[in-house]
Image (tube, grey):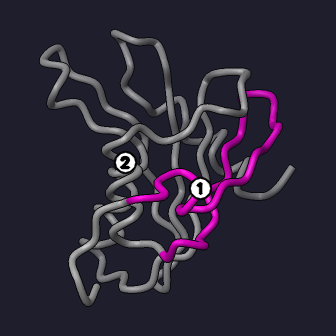
């Protein structure tokens, strides 16, 4: 198990998921260090926030300019629990197409994807 997996295990219980009971923790590696996020649900479901976006937005707020990797842990035993569509688009905005996304299952199994694999036709502004 990697150190990131252990860090994810420490924060996943901070997730606020009283409706879905599906907890997610994320770590984003950047030029400014690691940033953490967990999913936060709300009774008004559309205003809930995923762990990935919480971590990325925190990194942006702290001045990160270069985004390297994403590490995810869910409360599921599956290793194929990948980011939702909204998170894939946000990841696409900040990460290179070959950046790695490491998805851990609850029992520590990992599957690795690239941004390009998860969103092959992602939207980006020209010149970005």
| Distance CA(mark 1)–CA(mark 2) | 14 Å
Q: Is residue 104 found inside the magenta-colored segment of the image?
A: yes
Q: Position of residue 110 (x, y in %)?
A: 78, 44
Q: Is residue 78 found inside the magenta-colored segment of the image?
A: no
Q: Name the residue under label 2.
A: 87
Instruction: Relative to 100, say whether 66 is above or below.
Output: below
Q: Which residue is drawn at 55% across and 76% down?
A: 68
Q: Which residue is drawn at 37% across and 41% down?
A: 85
Instruction: Relative to 11, say whether 78 is above or below.
Output: above
Q: Nearer the viewer, mark 1 or mark 2?
A: 1
Please state the extent of the stretch shown in magenta in the rendering. Answer: 96-121
Mark 2 closeness class: few <14, some 14–19, many ≥20 residues within 10 Å: some
Q: Mark 1 points at which residue?
A: 117
Residue closer to the observer: 71 or 126: 126
Q: Locate residue 92: give its quadrant.
A: bottom left
User: Where residue 70 is drawn, which disc sits there?
Assistant: none
Mark 1 closeness class: few <14, some 14–19, many ≥20 residues within 10 Å: few
In which quadrant will I find the C terminus?
A: bottom left
Instruction: Relative to 110, say whether 55 is above or below.
Output: below
Q: Residue at x 48, y 41 (%)?
A: 83
Secondary structure of the residue carrying numbered label 2: helix
Q: Which residue is drawn at 50% across and 77% down?
A: 96
């Amino acid at each position: 198990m990697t150190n990131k997996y252990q860090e994810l295990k420490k924060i996943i219980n901070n997730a606020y998921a009283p409706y879905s009971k599906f907890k997610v923790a994320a770590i984003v590696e950047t030029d400014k260090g690691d940033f953490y996020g967990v999913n936060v649900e709300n009774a008004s479901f559309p205003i809930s926030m995923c762990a990935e976006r919480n971590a990325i937005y925190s990194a942006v707020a702290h001045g990160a300019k270069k985004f390297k990797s994403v590490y995810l842990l869910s409360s599921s035993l599956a290793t194929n629990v990948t980011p939702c569509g909204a998170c894939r688009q946000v990841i696409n905005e900040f990460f290179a197409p070959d950046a790695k996304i490491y998805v851990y299952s609850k029992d520590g199994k990992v599957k690795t994807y690239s941004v390009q694999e998860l969103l092959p036709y992602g939207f980006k502004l020209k010149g970005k």
